[in-house]
Image: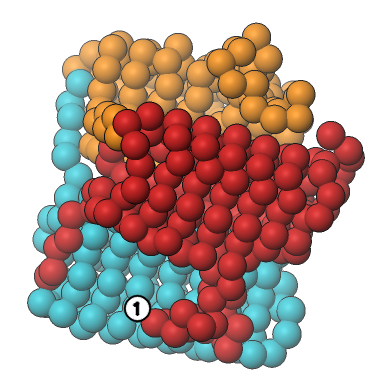
Chain colours: A orange, B cyan, C red
Amino acid sequence: MRIIDSGLKDVDADSSVTIIMPSNLYGCTLAKNVFVGPFVEIQKKVTIGARTKIQSHSFICELVEIGEDCFIGHGVMFINDVFSSGGPSGGDSSKWKKTSIGNKVSIGSNATMMPVNVCDNVVIGAGSVVTKDITEPGVYAGNPARKLRDL
Amino acid sequence: MRIIDSGLKDVDADSSVTIIMPSNLYGCTLAKNVFVGPFVEIQKKVTIGARTKIQSHSFICELVEIGEDCFIGHGVMFINDVFSSGGPSGGDSSKWKKTSIGNKVSIGSNATMMPVNVCDNVVIGAGSVVTKDITEPGVYAGNPARKLRDL
Amino acid sequence: MRIIDSGLKDVDADSSVTIIMPSNLYGCTLAKNVFVGPFVEIQKKVTIGARTKIQSHSFICELVEIGEDCFIGHGVMFINDVFSSGGPSGGDSSKWKKTSIGNKVSIGSNATMMPVNVCDNVVIGAGSVVTKDITEPGVYAGNPARKLRDL
């Protein structure tokens, strides 16, 4: 077996950033005052905006951008591969899709994020599955997530 | 970066308690014969009753009380902040809400628990999102969780 | 407290297998070129077929068999105990049920797998809760998961 230790590799972050270990971060960029809880994986090229908190057990994949003052709850999973050809695209990243999360977006625990765009000032309920872009502020929840009300 | 190792800090538990590492427990109280699986976080002031098992990948936040002889499955997330003012309340714990889980409550894997009261003798199905108090024994499931049948 | 370190114990795998640590694997069999991400638990007697990838944060319990060329997403939870007598069966494994996953099955992140049989060539959407056997190829999603379309 090839056994590889996770950890922090090529993480671009200054002294204002806090990371709880064990976590597995590589090739990502964390702005000022970002917090990352334990048991988190953040893949390469991800960018996280200032003051955003990534809580424990979350997974943030390549091609995700998260804005400032966001709260990513516990056990939130982001996705870039929608199995568009009937299965994983493997190394073919040309088939992956982007996720863009605006500023002041709060995502509840155990939510699942398909590759979407989410505008500023959005709350996503815990346990939701977000399958479509969210283009206006408000509170969204359910599987698939739908707008419940204005903020 | 400020890198902080997780682990066991100020955990009140006797020699009958088993904890699989890595886990992150601090300031919590675990009664006799509690079991905690790996990749678990339990926050301060949480109390876990005798013989209750907390399985891998679960997150138990401040203001949660769990009774005796419970089974908390894998990847179960508890919540104390419902973003009532449109986003996380941050350090303002006066906005957080309590969760109380009775005795002999079994919560299936990947369930999401909003801050609620759950009475004794309840089974919650895997993948459920529990949004309201459960006041009578039975089997509950779905998003949002509804009663399926008596035990 | 009895504190037990997780890790790799009695894992049957050759040099083509990659495992990212920390993970907790014991008594399982991983065929050639299997990949296991970080924060994964795989219990005893589990078998994983050649070239299958198990992504981060997933939990694979006893009595699960997974075929070849599968993709198990992040935060996927398998279940063997359906609380059939109103609660966990504890050490009584005679009450546990099997899961069999065929070849070329892709399971999206945060999916929850009750003990079922899934045939070859199936895609299961992220966040799904699979409660019944899947006997024909296709794309399935939802809670409970239903067929959306052919592959």
On screen, residue C66 versus residue C131, left or right, reads left
Residue B18 location, x and y as percent?
Answer: 20, 70
Residue A50, by quadrant, is top left
Residue furthest to the right: C149
On screen, residue A137 versus residue B93, left or right, reads right
**Along the line of sight, the residue nearer the viewer: C126 or A105:** C126
**Along the line of sight, the residue nearer the viewer: A133 or C17:** C17
Residue B7 location, x and y as percent?
Answer: 17, 50
**Along the line of sight, the residue nearer the viewer: B116 or A64:** A64
Residue occupying the point 70% across, 30% down: A87
Screen quadrant of the N terminus of chain A? top left
Residue B34 appears in view: yes
Mark 1: secondary structure: loop
Residue B77 appears in view: no
Residue A33, by quadrant, is top left
Screen quadrant of the C terminus of chain A? top right
Residue B67, by quadrant, is bottom left
Instruction: Give the labeled residue for mark 1.
Output: B52
Amino acid residing under circle 1: Thr
Residue C147 location, x and y as percent?
Answer: 85, 48
Residue occupying the point 59% across, 21% down: A90
Residue A72, compared with residue A30, is above or below; it is: below
Count of marks, rendered view: 1
Residue occupying the point 84% across, 50% down: C136
On screen, residue B130 versus residue B15, left or right, reads right
Residue B85, compared with residue B96, is above or below; it is: above
Residue A117 location, x and y as percent?
Answer: 67, 21
Residue A105, compared with residue B37, is above or below; it is: above
Residue occupying the point 36% across, 13% down: A27
**Chain to which the residue tagged by mark 1 belongs:** B
